[in-house]
Amino acid sequence: MNKITILIQKEQNVKKTFFVFLFFVFINSFSQEKIIGNFYIKAKMNYGLTKFKFDNDGIFQMKINDGLEIQNYGSGHYYIKKDSLYLDYDLTELKEKSYHRTKYFDSNKDSTTIKIRFLGKENKPVKNTLIDLRDNPPYFKAKKTDKNGIVIFKLKKKRRKVVFFITHEDYGDYEFKVWLHYNNIIDVYLHNSFGGLPIKKYFAKYKIKNITKDVIELKSNDKLLSLKRYKE
């Protein structure tokens, strides 16, 4: 075997070794089971962000912010299989909405009394909070709750409904309608309405195009997504 043949064979062996190395690097980059860290996707026109937090235990958290407040949120399990990333929104905690309960009765008076008690966390009274009465034609009357979270309105008896409205920094907005033909005793149970709409029982699959230390490139329905790492 001459020297030229030997050199050609050595060159071919080097190429084979190099391509085998690249192949295993490619396979290994997509065969990892976990993505750990914080990533974000910037919306078009730089308006709003979608943030992901991937933990070491296979749990992720997601929040979508429109630039002003959180619009959606969710959490669940994630895993990588072959060349795809799977997100199962199975751990999202659902929020209870504010609600009210009413007891009512009639009387022979030409006026009606509406007693409303507002309760917040752990059924504690919501004190010193402004409550609006909204009637039609446009008529507004406002009162503040006392130390027991109670406000009382005495109004002329009418066969129609009015709207009561509360806005609170901890609980958000809540409104409800009341018949003016009856006396009403109402308990309002306020819950936090901030934090966006939860996403649950949702399963997403993304094809992995590339993974580096700081960027994850995904594809879904012919759309390319770029998740960029950030530090909190």
Image (cartoon, grey):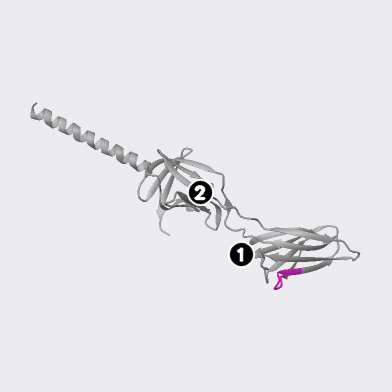
Q: Is residue 37 above or below residue 33?
A: below
Specify whether 196 is left or right of 103.
Answer: left
Amino acid carrying mark 1 in the image: Asp
**Magenta segment:** 144-151
Q: Position of residue 14 (x, y in %)?
A: 19, 35
Q: Which residue is disc 2 drawn over?
A: 76
Is residue 138 visible in the rendered structure shown here?
Answer: no
119 to the left or right of 51: right
Query: Type of residue at label 2?
Result: Gly
Q: Residue 155 location, x and y as percent? A: 83, 66
Magenta stretch: helix, strand or loop mostly: loop
User: Can you tell which quarter of the image residue 202 is in?
Assistant: top right
The kind of secondary structure element at disc 2 is: strand
- Residue 148 shown in magenta: yes
User: Disc 1 designates what residue?
Assistant: 170
Provide residue 133's location: percent of width, then percent of height. 75, 64
Element type at marker 1? loop
Side of 157 where 72 appears, left or right: left
Identify the residue shown where x is 80% and y is 60%. 103
Considering the image in quadrants, where does the C terminus appear? bottom left
Q: Which mark is residue 101?
A: none
Magenta stretch encompasses residue 74: no
Count up the numbered dots: 2
Q: CA distance from mark 2 to mark 1?
A: 26 Å
Would you call the spot at circle 1 few (<14 residues within 10 Å), some (14-19), or many (20 or more)?
few
Assess disc 2: are there few (<14), some (14-19) or many (≥20) residues with their C-alpha within 10 Å of its C-alpha.
many
Farthest-out residue, top: 1
Most extreme residue toward the right is 108
